[in-house]
Image (cartoon, coloured by chain):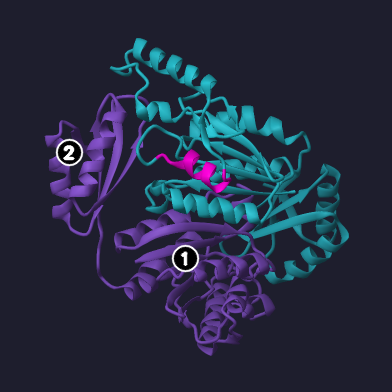
Chain colours: A purple, B cyan
């Protein structure tokens, strides 16, 4: 089961924003047993987004999560680009329009905005690719979209972290089933990191796990993350590493 | 002038690490006038890295900055993958080997490591793609590499932020010329974001700038970043926006 993530935003490509959204999405997908194979970031540009979406679909992931570019401003073009990439029309979602209307009326009543009406920019957010299921945005205006396209589950989420996170938890994860992957972090105490390599190699051959190691500065400690489908497999691997003389502490 | 960034690491794809390296690289490249068109992240896997590098080269950026996977552990495979992607052999850099030897001897003298010898893992770091110029790592062990390949300047940097940053500043940026791009951030006070769109559009037509806007919550403020080759062009654009009734504050 593999997944890809596409984040969209000029602010990421110029270095103004650190893309923490993709890390959040990646950790949730990993927990669900998906192997995130690639993360891609492109700008707020229809052609760039379209190209990236098509390339990702050609790699046939089971899940593609897209985040960013759903707002009312001129550079929010993600839904249009996704629709074009999937060769679908962008069509008005009546239910979304009603919700947007109610949303801006509430903001107006509460004194946040001067004009409660749905102008062009706001109305744009009610258009989704044909056949998409709208995803509720409990924290903001723009609805997301869920599209099953040629075997790929495509989710389109907002870029504002608060909105994206709520939609991921409430609308995306429940559509991905229950299977959980276990991952545990350890610190391995070792003064020669190359002695670790053959032992890790042996562990990979013996157990049904993946191991990621990363040096934490020089000497003393190396971080290890062990992934498996079951807790027991992680335990057995950790026990094996300790037997081989590696001092392991849970991190 | 466009550039791409490729970051490498399973820890990013599992969400354990937020990829702040690509934001740092992006901001430095943007300052130098490069338009970063895409950021890609793949795991510590020769085939994945190779595929990504080849795809990026096919898009013909002027600059490709790669970061991550240069260390001594079993999953540090970036140099090998880059060499394969460029159809070059991986060959021993004698100067790098000398520096690595001195580096580990120093760590040993200072009591950080038990064994100062260059074992396989450490020696691996002295191998660079044929024709590469080694880039000095003032903060760690692994040298980087600079390769001019079919018109693309390819830089391979370590993933540890402290090492990557020093190498980017000292070894990469001086090889990219002096031209600077100006970017200034503003907050636009506005209570209806859709009124902004046609004014921004007009500014884009009148001036040689790029403008990125992003909503900061609801109502009141929208963040604007104006990019131009010269400060004066940013000033003229800001003056025009103010003339059109947009309250702009420097952010």
Q: List x then y, in percent, for residue B241.
A: 81, 58
Q: Residue at x 83, y 47 (%)?
A: B235
Q: List x then y, in percent, for residue A97.
A: 56, 85
A244 displayed left or right of B110: left
Q: Residue at x 26, y 52 (%)?
A: A227
The stretch in magenta equals B76-87
Q: Residue furthest top?
A: B109
Q: Residues within 10 Å of mark 2 (few under 14, many from 20)?
A: some
Closer to the camera, B183 or B49?
Answer: B49
Q: Residue at x 21, y 54 (%)?
A: A208
Q: Is residue B114 visible?
A: yes
Q: List x then y, in percent, for residue A183.
A: 26, 52
Q: Is residue A157 visible?
A: no
Residue for badge 2: A241
- Chain for disc number 1: A
- Chain for disc number 2: A
The reply to whether callout 2 and callout 1 are in contact (CB within 8 Å) is no
Both marks 2 and 1 on one chain: yes
Residue for badge 1: A163
Closer to the camera, B247 or B148?
Answer: B148
Looking at the rendering, which quadrant does residue A168 occupy? bottom left
Q: Is residue B60 above or below residue A80?
A: above
B151 displayed left or right of B15: right
Q: Is residue A63 above or below residue A248?
A: below
Q: Residues within 10 Å of mark 1 (few under 14, many from 20)?
A: many
């Amino acid at each position: 089961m593999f997944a890809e993530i596409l984040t969209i935003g000029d602010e990421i490509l110029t270095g103004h924003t650190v893309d923490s959204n993709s890390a959040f999405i990646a950790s949730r997908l990993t927990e669900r047993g998906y192997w995130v194979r690639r993360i891609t970031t492109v700008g707020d540009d229809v052609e760039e987004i379209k190209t990236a979406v098509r390339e990702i679909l050609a790699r046939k992931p089971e899940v593609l999560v897209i985040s960013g570019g759903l707002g009312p401003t001129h550079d929010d073009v993600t839904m249009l680009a996704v629709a074009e990439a999937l060769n679908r029309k962008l069509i008005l979602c009546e239910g979304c329009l009603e919700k947007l209307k109610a949303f801006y009326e509430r903001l107006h009543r509460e004194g946040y905005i001067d004009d409660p009406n749905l102008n062009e920019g706001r109305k744009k957010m009610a258009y989704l690719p044909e056949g998409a299921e709208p995803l509720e945005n409990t924290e903001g205006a723009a609805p997301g979209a869920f599209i099953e396209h040629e075997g790929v589950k495509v989710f389109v989420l907002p870029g504002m972290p608060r909105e994206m996170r709520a939609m991921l938890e409430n609308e995306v994860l429940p559509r991905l089933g229950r299977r959980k992957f276990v991952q545990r972090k350890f610190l391995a105490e070792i003064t020669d990191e190359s002695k670790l390599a053959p032992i890790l190699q042996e562990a990979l051959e013996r157990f049904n796990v993946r191991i990621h190691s990363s040096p934490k500065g020089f000497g003393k400690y190396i971080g290890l993350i062990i992934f498996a489908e079951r807790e027991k497999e992680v335990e057995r691997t950790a026990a094996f590493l300790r037997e081989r003389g590696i001092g392991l502490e849970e991190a």
